[in-house]
Image: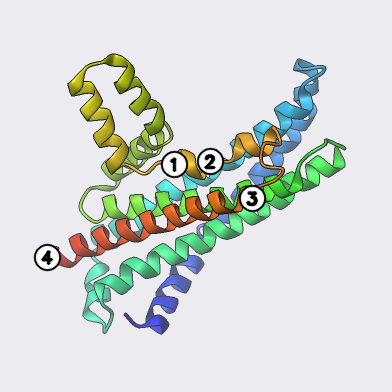
Amino acid sequence: MNINRIFVLANNVFQEVVRDRILYIIGFYALILAIAFRVLPEFAATTEDKMFLDFGLAAMNAIGLIVTIFVGTGLVNKEIEKRTILMLIAKPVSRSEIIVGKYLGLSAILAVLVAMMTALYLIFLQFGNIPHPTTSILIAAIFLFLQLSLITSVAIAFSVFTASLLATVLSFAVYLIGNITQDLVQLGRISHNPGMEGLTQGLFLILPDLSRLDLKNDAVYGLQALPDTTALITNAGYGLLYSVMLLAIAILIFSQREF
C-alpha cells in the first residue's frame, strides 16, 4: 500500500463529509447542552450536576455513533451503487488502499467531532461551576473516539458485501450487543444451560467487547481519578487490534468482489 495514495483518499473522504455539513452537528450538540443546562435543574434540585455530567457524555456518544454508522456504511456502498467504484479501481489504486483511506478519512472526521464536542462540554461545565474530573473526561473522550473508530471498521466491513440498510442495522446490532457481551456471558453461566452458555461464550469471542472502551461512568463518578495506565493501554490496544482485524476482513471481501 502506498501512504501517499491512502492520504489522498482519506483527505477526499474528509472533504466530502465536511461538504455534507456533518460538522454542523457540533452546533446541534451545543444546542442540546444549552437546553439540558437550563431544564435539568427544574427536574433534579440536588443531583442536576451529576445528571448534566452524564447527559453530556451520553449525548456525545449517541451523536458520534449515529454519524459513524450512517456515514461509515455509505462510504463504500455509495461508490458501488453509483458505479463510481469502477473509476476508482481503474486507477492505480489498490482495493486495500480504498478501504484504509476511507477508514482513516472518517476517523479524522470523528476525531474532530469528539474533540470539539468535548471542548464544548468542558466549557459548559466550567460556565456552570459544575465540579468535574477533567482528566477523566478527557480519557473518556479519547476512548470514545477509539470505540467509534472500531464501529467505523464494523460499518465498513458490513458495507462491502451488504446493502446500506442492512449494514446499518447490523452495525447497530454489533454496537448494542458489544456493550453487553460480558453480561451475556454471566447470563449464560447463570442459566446452567450448555447451549445458552455456548452461545453467549461464542458471542463474547466473536463480537468486540465495547465495554472496555466505555469510560463514561468512570468520568461521571470519578472512578478514573487515578487511571490504571496498564489497563488503559491494554484496552486501547484491544480496540486498535480489533479495528485492524475488521479492516483486514473488509479488504479480503472487497478484493474478491466483481464489479
Q: Quadrant of the C terminus?
A: bottom left
Q: Find the distance from the CA under tag 4 to the CA under tag 3.
A: 43 Å
Mark 3, secondary structure of its residue: helix
What residue did someone put label 2 on?
Answer: 214
What residue did someone put label 4 on?
Answer: 258
For the question of whether residue 169 can be seen, the reply is yes
Q: Find the distance from the CA under tag 3 to the CA under tag 1.
A: 15 Å
Q: Quadrant of residue 157?
A: bottom left
Q: Is residue 10 left or right of residue 57?
A: left
- Expressed as whole percent of the image width and height from the top left, the position of residue 94 reads 26, 77
Q: Are marks 2 and 1 in contact (CB under 8 Å)?
A: yes
Q: Find the distance from the CA under tag 4 to the CA under tag 2.
A: 38 Å
Q: Nearer the viewer, mark 4 or mark 3?
A: 3
Tell me which amino acid carries mark 2.
Asp
What residue did someone put label 1 on?
Answer: 210
101 or 18: nearer the viewer: 101
Tell me which amino acid carries mark 1.
Leu
Mark 2, secondary structure of its residue: loop
10 Å crowding of disc 3: few (<14), some (14-19), many (20+) = some
What residue did someone put label 3 on?
Answer: 139
Q: Quadrant of the N terminus?
A: bottom left
- Expressed as whole percent of the image width and height from the top left, the position of residue 69 reads 41, 47
